Amino acid sequence: MRMADQLYLSLWFPNFRLASLPAALTSVLRQFALIAKDGQTNSTLGRVAAASVYPIDWTESPTYQRIYVNDDRAQQSADTEGSIIENAVAEATEQLHDDMAYEFEMRWMLWTPEADSASCLDTAWRLEPARVRICGFGPDFDHNSYEQNGQIRVDFGLDTPWTFEGQDDEEIDADAAEHVRQNVEKLLAFTLSVEKHSGISSRLLWTESGEPLAEKLVARLQRVN
């Protein structure tokens, strides 16, 4: 049984300059919002949930942080206006510095089994909000880590919704496999949308362990089908 792994998408842009970062972030966030809102009635899925700015490296406390109230009670409030992608990016990146990282949190809906289920067999599945962090890096942040992480990195969290690691093969039925496929389609739709519309020069979908997601997914689906 394999353990769950952290999943990332790294993006690089041609002839990139720090001044281009707000526009690049806005474009990537827009593509995410389009996929997140597709077929969903929850209007808050296209909004920024939180924004943070980190100096120097990840061990430092944020110099800027704002958490947005995105619910039905706040639809007409100034806070909700601030959570519009363009507004949130503009505010967080008002002061651009080479040694800072600019992180934006958003949500999308992924299929997940009931939390209290010990097995996937006969388990009820639900579409639940999942957090995604999209971060743009200044060239001097964290010892020039953008060279490996990309000028923008998308942190999807654990890869469990796409590989369902942590469950034995006999606990994965056809219904579970179908929900995993639907989650994968959403992941690929976002990746391809960014590639088509955000002007990137290259991208890399990778896991923290270094094991390719595609190989993990194919291996899992071959074992359960």
Image (cartoon, rainbow, N blue to C red):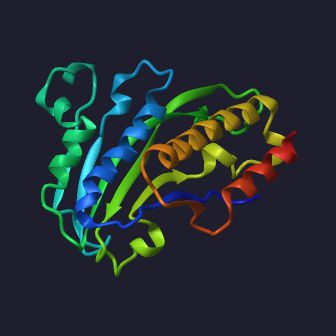
Horizontal side, residue 40 vs residue 120: left or right: left
Task: Report the residue at 21% width, 21% height from top.
Answer: 75
Task: Note whether 122 is above or below 134 in the view shown.
Answer: above
Horizontal side, residue 137 vs residue 216: left or right: left
Quadrant including the C terminus: top right
Report whether residue 128 is seen. yes
Residue 172 location in percent, x, y? 79, 39
Task: Report the residue at 43% width, 39% height from top.
Answer: 31
Task: Note whether 60 is above or below 201 in the view shown.
Answer: below
Horizontal side, residue 154 vs residue 119: left or right: left
Task: Note whether 151 is above or below 131 in the view shown.
Answer: below
Residue sitting at the far front:
15
Residue 202 location in percent, x, y? 52, 61
Q: Nearer the viewer, residue 125 or 109?
A: 109
Marks counted in the figure total 0
Residue sitting at the far bottom:
143
Q: Nearer the viewer, residue 1 or 10?
A: 10
Task: Report the residue at 77% width, 58% height from top.
Answer: 1
- Residue 204: quadrant of the picture: bottom right
Residue 121 location in percent, x, y? 77, 32
Residue 162 location in percent, x, y? 65, 45
Q: Nearer the viewer, residue 153 or 107?
A: 153
Report whether residue 67 is seen. no
Task: Report the residue at 73% width, 31% height from top.
Answer: 178
- Residue 147: quadrant of the picture: bottom left
Horizontal side, residue 58 vs residue 119: left or right: left
